[in-house]
Image (spheres, rainbow, N blue to C red):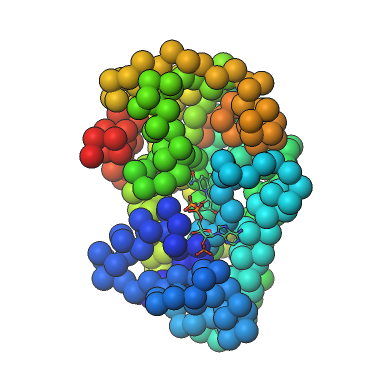
Amino acid sequence: MRVLIGGGSGFVGRELTRLLRDKGHEVTVISRQPGPGRITWGELESRGLPPCDGAVNLAGENVLNPLRWWNESYKKDLFSSRIDTTKTLSQAIAGSSSPPRSWVLVSGVACYKPSLTAEYTEDSAWMPFDLLSQLCKEWEAAAFLPESAAKSTKQVVIRAGAVLGQDGGAMKQMLLPFWLGLGGTLGSGRQPFPWIHVSDLAGIIARSLEPPVLSEAMPPTPQVYNGVAPTITTNYEFTKELGRILRRPTIFPVPEFIMSVLLGSERAVILTQGQKVIPMKTLESGYQFKYPDLTSALKQIVGS
Ligand code: NDP
């Protein structure tokens, strides 16, 4: 299979590329930078979709970029880096004379309203309630294919929780303070912390890329899968488990107002609040998690 991956140079994209190449598939990355095995977004727009059997979009400015202040220009980049790239790719698919059999967007669980009690499956209804959920709505809407294109291309949206792995994402920023014994709960610590190991997210994407069986009726709207581990974890449980595995104390809680001052209140909610997200459809699809629980995931990440 030939797979085109927007933002494939990033944390999740590198893992997905490894997995697909190990399975014998060919990968082309869409990037802002030209290079071997890559095309640029400009080339995609001007030349149209290169021949491919599956397409994925993983592009997006990092929401927790520690080097960027929470201001209008950053918010604009968060939106445009996701929505414009997704639109460019979905329009290229819709305009292609030989479209791919599958088209996968990875969005986020920020569409679900944070709650200590509510549980969300892929079937849960949701409406935008803040900036990040509005972002999810526009991002997912940008992936929709028109009816004519939806007949030949399977559409999938995977809503990912915090992606944990050695090579990037939240762990990269968290490990140093935890190693130094400065780790602690964020806010109350009672908030759910939906997470997934990067290897499982890549596995769910790879599975979603598999072409639909011929007899399968192609739904006109995307199939949604929650990209989270099946074990519900709170921030407190995550903090204590990471400290235990690293053999470091975790006695320095960070109050919510400090997080809001450091990150901006609209973005701090990613860490100080959370949702109980259930990967119901993901499990029903038969996907078997390599790292279904936090201990096995953290041991793999920190152990080596
Ligand atoms: P990365 O932060 O690693 O970024 C992925 C790629 O996006 C980069 O390699 C870069 O590619 C491209 N990119 C970055 N900034 C911009 C920009 N301003 N404009 C256009 N392209 C840009 O992302 P991850 O791999 O961690 O995540 C993949 C996707 O999954 C993202 O859309 C993310 O929002 C989503 N997600 C990630 C989570 C996580 O915890 N990591 C959680 C939930 C969702 P290049 O430089 O080659 O152009």
Left or right? Give the position of 156 relative to 114: left
Residue 20 spot, x, y in % from top left: 32, 64
Looking at the rendering, in which quadrant would you find the N terminus?
A: bottom left
Residue 44 spot, x, y in % from top left: 57, 78
Looking at the rendering, in which quadrant would you find the C terminus?
A: top left
Label count reads 0
Q: Residue furthest right?
A: 72
Picture quadrant where residue 298 is located:
top left
Residue at 52% from the left image edge and 26% from the top image edge: 192
Query: In the rendered view, would you say 215 is above or below 258?
Result: below
Residue at 49% from the left image edge and 75% from the top image edge: 34
Picture quadrant where residue 209 is located:
bottom left
Q: Which residue lies furthest to the top in this view?
A: 251
Residue 261 visible within the image:
yes
| The one of 258 and 155 positioned closer to us in this rendering | 258
Left or right? Give the position of 192 relative to 197: right
| The one of 304 and 262 positioned closer to us in this rendering | 262
Query: In the rendered view, would you say 86 is above or below 242?
Result: below
Residue at 36% from the left image edge and 15% from the top image edge: 249
Left or right? Give the position of 128 relative to 36: right
Residue 155 spot, x, y in % from top left: 54, 63
Residue 292 spot, x, y in % from top left: 33, 36
Residue at 44% from the left image edge and 76% from the top image edge: 35
Residue 279 visible within the image:
no
